[in-house]
Amino acid sequence: MNIMTTTDDYGVVSEDATLTLERLLPGPIDRVWSYLVDSDLRRQWLAAGAMEQRVGTPVDLVWRNDELTDPPGTRPDGMGEEHRMTCEVLECEAPHLLAISWGSTGGVTFTLREQGDEVLLTIVHQRVTDPTVLLNVSAGWHSHVDVLEAKLRGTAATPHWDNFVRLRGDYAARLAG
């Protein structure tokens, strides 16, 4: 069963080139938190990399997007088999808040808030000023969270790369308007 994208699933970009994406996920909150901070669980939807839950510690993230879904879909031109980035933990208040640096942008904040049996995940990716990067970041976060939601719900995700390409087209139209 594939997750169907609804209008509410799309991220919103504010005037300061900050993307905010929210998704309601099945709880409990500690389970969702573990998918943010545990390397083995995080690699199933985003990127591997050991993380100390302590401010100031480095996190070496390793993306292998071909491994996220089976099948992975068709990898777009220009996307490698692996991508690496070193980040730093900027804030950590388990199991509610994790903020990390993120390349040349203003960083990423993950906030978890319980809503009954579910958990509202809010991702805020700050100051992504390059329009091409913003397009890839928007589609990337959305497609990765689709995989996370499928994992947490025990369903099959849409092939990652096919979903990413489709979402990149959707976000190109949304960001142009």
Image: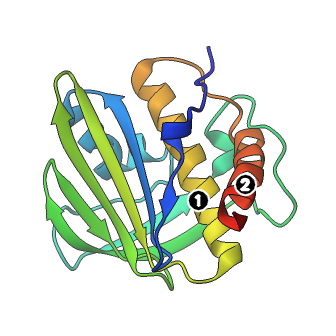
Question: Quadrant where the C terminus lies?
Answer: bottom right
The type of residue carrying mark 2 is: Arg
In the depicted structure, whether residue 81 falls above or below residue 157:
below
Residue at the farthest left position: 93
Q: Amino acid at mark 1?
A: Ser
* Image x and y of residue 85, in percent: 52, 73
Residue found at x 33% / y 51% = 122
Q: Residue at x 77, y 52 (%)?
A: 169
On screen, residue 72 above or below 144: above
> Which residue occupies the foreground of this view, 7 or 33?
7
Residue under numbered circle 1:
138
| Residue sitting nearer the eye, 96 or 86 | 96
Give the residue pinned by disc 2.
168
In the image, 15: left or right of 131? left
Q: Residues within 10 Å of mark 1 (few under 14, many from 20)?
A: many
Quarter where residue 63 is shown: bottom right
Distance of label 1 from label 2 (alpha carbons): 8 Å
